[in-house]
Amino acid sequence: MDNHHKEDIKALDELFQKVSTYRTSHDFKTLLLFIKRFRYISPYNAFLIHIQKPGSQYVATLEDWQYKFQRDIKPGARPLVILQPFGPVRFVFELGDTYGKTPFPEQLLKPFQTHGSLELSKYYNLIKNLTCDGISYNESDYGTNLAGRIQTAQKNMSSMYNKKYVKILYIMIVNKNHSKEEKFATITHELGHLYCGHLGTPDIKWWSDRHDQKIEICEFEAECVSWLVCERNNIKNPSAEYLSGYVEKNGQIPQISLENVLKASGMIEKKMHNSYLPIRKELILNKPGTQSKLLGIVKKRHTLPT
């Protein structure tokens, strides 16, 4: 993502924090449900759509409306702006701003069915691609009430990935006795902590350093990330109960960083949708045990409660 996009994203966070947009429990819940609906675009872009046109049902580019759905854009319709990786912004139009003789596929307007089963390819892609960020995935024989944890790794740890030695910075441990879907919810929660910066960062270009946040904020952000990713992939998860209980008890949500929640969710989904992601170059080692020269320092918060 280029610098221009990063500035746009920080502006979204400023809108969220200073103008109190979506700070009430009701408005924030509405936002999460909206982002859940738009599974085919990134969480960031779903948020942008909600800001520009709340209540949107489906969006697509001019080309997709014409060639994929055989529909045209109504005269005078205003395009909606979303971000495009490694390029300029992209313009899309909402379903209500189109017309055509071919009925729009009804199933695309009903994305809320939750089947409770995760695609195996997405599950294994996610676990496999954790190594790209220096994360070692492990399973342990925990009791029922312990789902898992993430912590900083000891020095000189490495792992093989795609025939290369990779520096290990973090250890993730998940309860092996849980189902695939339960493990997935745990993984997304722990990655929510990591990618929201709760454990610090090896490099500020990777993700933010927010190791000094209050536990309440850390947990709410991680639960939001887990809920978004799970719900956008048809998985019911414990985060729903946590978030529901919090918003019912409190009139407003904590002073979270919506920017980091959306960014973390997008990073996780990217790992799910790609068979092999490139290793961060700072993590590639010449041989096992060799120290990798990192641009930053992993901060002192070693383990977070789950």
Image: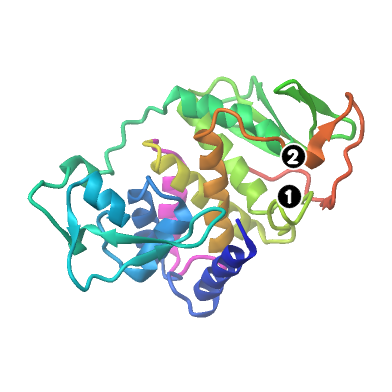
Quadrant of the rendered image containing residue 220: bottom right
Percent across and percent down for residue 125 are 55, 28
Q: Amino acid at mark 2?
A: Gln
Looking at the rendered structure, the secondary structure element under dot 1 is loop
Name the residue rendered at 34%, 56% in the picture: 34
Q: Which residue occupies the foreground of this view, 61 or 5?
A: 61
Label 1, on which residue? 199
Q: Which residue occupies the foreground of this view, 234 or 12?
A: 12
Quadrant of the rendered image containing residue 45: bottom left
Percent across and percent down for residue 278 are 67, 35
In this rendering, position of residue 24 left or right of residue 264: left
The N terminus sits in image quarter: bottom right
Q: Is residue 213 above or below residue 251?
A: above
Label 2, on which residue? 151
Percent across and percent down for residue 254 are 54, 66
Asked if one can make out residue 248 in the rendered structure from this viewpoint, the answer is no
Looking at the rendered structure, the secondary structure element under dot 2 is strand
Judging from the image, the colouring scheme is: rainbow
